[in-house]
Amino acid sequence: MLFIDPTKDLDTISSRDAFERHVAEHAPAGFLEMRSQQLRAIEQNRVLLDHLKINLHGARCLDIGPGHGDSLDLWHELGASECAFVDRDPWSATHNRLKPYRPRGWQMQHFLSIQQLPERHFDFVWSYGAMSARQWYCRAFRGFGLRHWLRRVERLCRPNATIVICPHWSARDGVRLDGDPEYHWIAESFERAGFKPLPFLSGHNIEPVYPITWIKEVPRVRERTAARRVLDFAAIRKLLERISKWPAGAVAAHCLDSAMELIELADFCGFVA
Ligand SMILES: C[S@@+](CC[C@H](N)C(=O)[O-])C[C@H]1O[C@@H](n2cnc3c(N)ncnc32)[C@H](O)[C@@H]1O
């Protein structure tokens, strides 16, 4: 029997009714599961905004991995001037695109392509459950992958913006597989990128899979990360050779868009004197 991918023509759908008919016909399990958790997602967002006392009126907001996008609806209700999103799931992307206030959205793999979004644009960036320490991109080069992604996310922000990231942690039978998040390498990567952990917020964090949220207030003036160092060129060449052989290396190199970033990667890997 011929398999026809039900997501193939999603980007041509232009009305809510047509989209809902398509959902009813194909019952996409992941999307429907996210739809069933609407209230939970709104509450998680609201608790955090109340805790931070953030006023989103007139703000340009971005959700990285919104799924059903209930965050976007809340921000719209709170008067945000922009409720944008990036999600690789075609069902979520189409659903969010067709909301009445027409959010701006990008359907893409955010680890690889987030830098395609406008620079110095957003006041509030939120990501709940769209990254995890187990993903190869985050782990690349002993956590440099995550740090580099955080830096690309920060570039999308205006000065004084707030970035809030709550990673997903894998668990089995109610027990987290990777131990205590505060002592995990992921904590070091977040902290080296200038993020701080928030206290556990009941109604926002959920044990064991969403135990910790990191936050960063983007500084007014961008930090200069390009420290002057003595470069060990032979070692950097060795690093480049290693990158190009490693299957994920070509992809990592694709995301490094300046010589300075390569030097920083070399530094991170201990190749700079
Ligand atoms: C666990 S759901 C969370 C949805 C929503 N943030 C919430 O709190 O209900 C993760 C969402 O992130 C998206 N996502 C995960 N990894 C992604 C990636 N690498 N690039 C783009 N989207 C991603 C998924 O498609 C999904 O919509």
Image: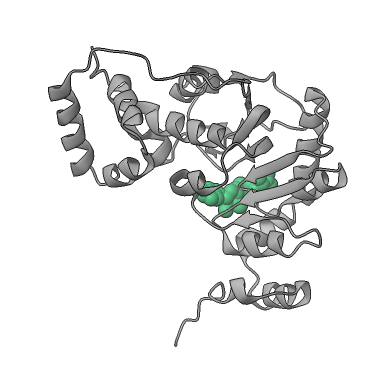
Report the front residue among 198 and 37.
198
Q: Is residue 36 above or below residue 148?
A: below
Q: Position of residue 45 (x, y in %)?
A: 76, 37
- Name which quarter of the figure residue 259 lies in: top left
Q: Say which quadrant the N terminus sits in.
A: bottom left
Q: How many marks?
A: 0
Q: Kindly identify the residue that appears in the image at 49 percent across and 52 percent down.
A: 109
Looking at this rendering, what residue extends furthest in the bottom direction?
1
Q: Say which quadrant the C terminus sits in.
A: top left
- Name which quarter of the figure residue 232 lies in: top left
Q: Position of residue 28 (x, y in %)?
A: 62, 67
Q: Seen in the image, is 126 located left or right of residue 145?
A: right
Q: Position of residue 188 (x, y in %)?
A: 47, 19
The type of colouring in the image is one colour
Looking at this rendering, what residue extends furthest in the front direction?
221
- Name which quarter of the figure residue 60 lies in: top right
> Is residue 187 visible to the viewer in this orientation of the structure?
yes
Q: Position of residue 186 (x, y in %)?
A: 47, 25
Q: Kindly identify the residue that appears in the image at 16 percent across and 23 percent down.
A: 233
Q: Kindly identify the residue that appears in the image at 37 percent across and 39 percent down.
A: 257
Q: Seen in the image, is 223 located left or right of residue 159?
A: left
Q: Is residue 172 above or below residue 116?
A: above
Q: Seen in the image, is 103 located left or right of residue 266?
A: right
Q: Seen in the image, is 144 located left or right of residue 245?
A: right
> Is residue 209 visible to the viewer in this orientation of the structure?
no
